[in-house]
Structure formats: structure tokens, C-alpha cells
Image: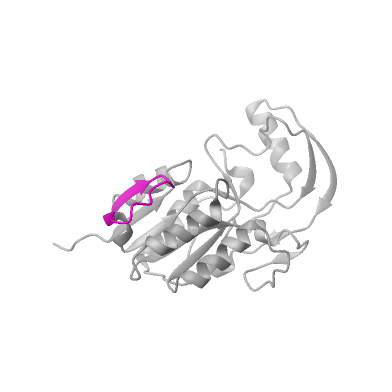
Amino acid sequence: MIDKKSVGIVGCGWLGKPLAETLSDAFNVECFSRETTSDDSSFWHRDTIIVAINTKDNYLATLQKIATLASASSNIILMSSISVYREFDTEVDESAVITQIGRQKEAEELMQKLREKLVILRLGGLMGEDRISGKWKSVSAFTDGEVNYIRRDDVIDITKKILEYDVKNGIFNLVAPLHPLRSEVHKKNSKTFGLELGTFQGKTSRVVSSDAIVKKLNYTFLHPDPLEFWN
């Protein structure tokens, strides 16, 4: 019997928990909170460690701790964000030269300095289940523009395929290939869920390409169209 590859997930929240549940069918998976920093834990000697934590609470220090504790033979997958492209107002891909360095880009650069085997996944706006575009507690005015969303199911499926294909390096955008206007998505969801429709002023034109991950994995998105995310 072939032993399953071992996977450790740091961060058992909205993404990490269902990711662990799905991966456990094919891999030996453990999921821990970001506070898991025991030097002698077998957790840090797994084949792959996935980091799925938010940028709050000493984020950079936490990443440095993870990179230090993880075995040199472990591959790391860092869940990053397309927020690194905030300076762009056009179509953009992984080759873009980023000059406005925010916390998420700092995190990527820190991990790149500390780890050789590193996959960075720049996630689009995470949607699905209880995360519904247009359902906001405190925001009613929006800038219109093409959305760069991704369903959680696709993030999980792509991560699983990265493990299956044994991808050990690279930066990849994870964004649904279709980009309807935010106003279109909100209008549809307002009718579907009975939400109050906000107002829209101005327009941005940032469209994040996911062609690289599609080519790398020969991937077909489960949910390519944000207008259909909640059907």
C-alpha cells in the first residue's frame, strides 16, 4: 500500500477547513490554527504546508515563523491575494512589475527569500456559500468595474490538482475567467436574495488573468461565471 502524501494546513477558517476536508480523501491532512508554532511538532515535517491565514495579527512575523519551522524538504503553498495588483487599471497577469508594495506583496517577498519550494496563489475575491457579492453590512456605494472573483470550490479544486501534479514553484492568479460588471452581479443577487441594491459611481478596468494556472494544470473552472456563482 502506498502511503498518502502528508499535508498540513495553517489556518482552519472559511477556506482552510473545507480545504482540509476535501484533501483528506487523497492525502494525510492535518489543519491547525496560526498559533501552531511548536518547534518539535511533526506538523512541520509534512510534504506540503498550506498557509491560509489572513493578513491580521503579526502576519509577517507569523509567516517567518512558519518558514523557519517547516522542514527544508517541505513544499509551501501560500494563499496570497490579487490585492497586490491594486496599482493597475488594465488587464494584468503574473508578469506585472509591482511597484506599490503592500503587506501582501511584502509577505510574498519574505517567503520567496526564505523558501526555495514555494507556490504562491493570488486569490481573487473569494465567493460562495454565505459570501454573496452585494451582501454587505456597511457599504452601499460602489465603484463599478469588471469583477475578479473566484468560488471557494475552485480554489480547493485547483489546490488539490497542484498537489496531484506535484507543482513546487510558481506564482499563479486564481480568478474565474469571466469578468461581468460588479453592478450586473449585484443586480442579479439583489433579485435572487432580496438584497438592497447599492449605488455605483465611476468605473475601474482591472481584469486579472488566470491563463497561467489554466495552462499549467489544463484546468477547467467549476464556476467560470460570477453571475452564476449562487445558482
Q: Is residue 26 left or right of residue 130?
A: left
Q: Is residue 79 magenta?
A: no
| Image: 15 above or below 86 | above
Residue 217 visible (yes or no): no
Image coords of residue 93 (percent x, y): 65, 68
Could you tell me which quadrant the N terminus lies in? bottom left
Could you tell me which quadrant the C terminus lies in? top right
**33 and 191: which is toward the camera:** 33
The structure residue drawn at horizontal position 41% and vertical position 64%, both measured from the top left corner, is 68
Q: Is residue 157 left or right of residue 24?
A: right
Range shown magenta: 27-42
| Image: 180 above or below 196 | below
Image coords of residue 112 (percent x, y): 52, 70
The structure residue drawn at horizontal position 54% and vertical position 68%, both measured from the top left corner, is 171
Image coords of residue 137 (percent x, y): 68, 29
The structure residue drawn at horizontal position 61% and vertical position 50%, both measured from the top left corner, is 225
Residue 180 visible (yes or no): yes
